[in-house]
Amino acid sequence: MANVHNRRMNEPADYTPPQVWTPPPASGGRFAHINRPVAGATHERPLPVGKHPLQLYSLGTPNGVKVTVMLEELLALGHSGAEYDAWLVNIQEGEQFGSGFVGANPNSKIPALVDHSGGHEGKAPVRVFESGAILVYLAEKFGAFLPTEPAQRAECLSWLFWQMGSAPFLGGGFGHFYAYAPHKIRYAIDRYAMEVKRQMDVLDRRLAESAFVAGDAYTIADMAIWPWYGALAKGQLYEAGEFLQAGSYSHVLRWAEMLAQRPAVRRGRMVNRRFGDPASQLHERHDASDFELRTQDKVAPAPDKT
Ligand SMILES: N[C@@H](CCC(=O)N[C@@H](CS)C(=O)NCC(=O)O)C(=O)O
């Protein structure tokens, strides 16, 4: 077998992978300071628990937004049992490695949900991690946004799992090397740009056939895919709209704009958001009135410049 490491164009040029990998002292990438080669908690920190049955520990990234959109959609449908407290987890500060969070998600990534609704019957809280699992859990708990007819259910779950399998190529692959890596590596950017454009074409062809991803009905598949691929089509991800010609996927764009108009989607994307217009940032959500009363422009108004 050819020696796989016998390359002439390594990066850096004098690099050959050693027999045994060891962590680099500092790679300089945007997330380098929170990356670790081991799992588990780094410090004791219990999770706060609010007044509602559902406790969400998250951040307004695409993976977090999937769940807050779902919760807001459930509430809009009249499911009062979907009332929730959304707590902010600052992943740049390593809060995902606190003991309480690791208890809710041993994988130390937002979002994590803890359902206390069985407490009055003496049932232990239920923890759910992985955004796709949280969407399915909520859909089944409330009987909404996941079709029960077997063929439609299969279509919905297929697209949901498509998102879960595909997005790491978009975020961890393309986004990382295009936007976050400390220097640009053409090989990596070409590889992931190729795959992300292929994925966008998959979605575009599907959305040429049907109004929503899984067919005629709005489902958890749309909620999972929209924060990633909808944002990309609208040029809101990694400042890569022009580079990937993301707006040329016209069916994705049509669908992304349609979803963006939904009041529950507009609310959901504000929750745990820590960037953009202060009026669009609701760092924590504990009550429906928080959207009116507790956005960042209201709780921390910009200093008066006069
Ligand atoms: N497959 C997971 C991915 C979650 C994920 O990657 N979360 C990121 C933020 S979007 C995170 O918490 N990163 C912190 C870390 O890697 O330490 C899901 O969909 O829930």
Image (cartoon, rainbow, N blue to C red):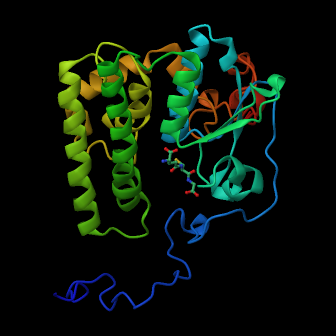
Pick the residue in front: 249 or 166: 166
Left or right of 111? Residue 179 is left
* Residue drawn at point x = 53 percent, y = 80 percent: 23
Question: Can residue 243 be seen from the camera position used here?
Answer: no
Pick the residue in front: 142 or 224: 142
Left or right of 32? Residue 213 is left
* Residue drawn at point x = 75 percent, y = 36 percent: 303
In the displayed structure, 269 sits above or below 189; it is above
Tell me how many marks there are: 0
* Residue drawn at point x = 38 percent, y = 53 percent: 175
In the displayed structure, 251 sits above or below 79; it is below
Where does the N terminus fall, quadrant-wise? bottom left
The residue furthest top is: 78
Pick the residue in front: 265 or 112: 112
Position in image of residue 116 (x %, y %): 75, 30
In the displayed structure, 91 sits above or below 132; it is below
Position in image of residue 2 (x %, y %): 16, 87
Question: Can residue 24 be seen from the camera position used here?
Answer: yes
In the rendered image, which quarter is residue 258 located in? top left
In the rendered image, which quarter is residue 77 located in? top right
Where does the C terminus fall, quadrant-wise? top right
In the displayed structure, 156 sits above or below 199; it is above
Position in image of residue 192 (x %, y %): 27, 56
Position in image of residue 203 (x %, y %): 24, 33
* Residue drawn at point x = 71 percent, y = 62 percent: 41
Left or right of 184? Residue 27 is right
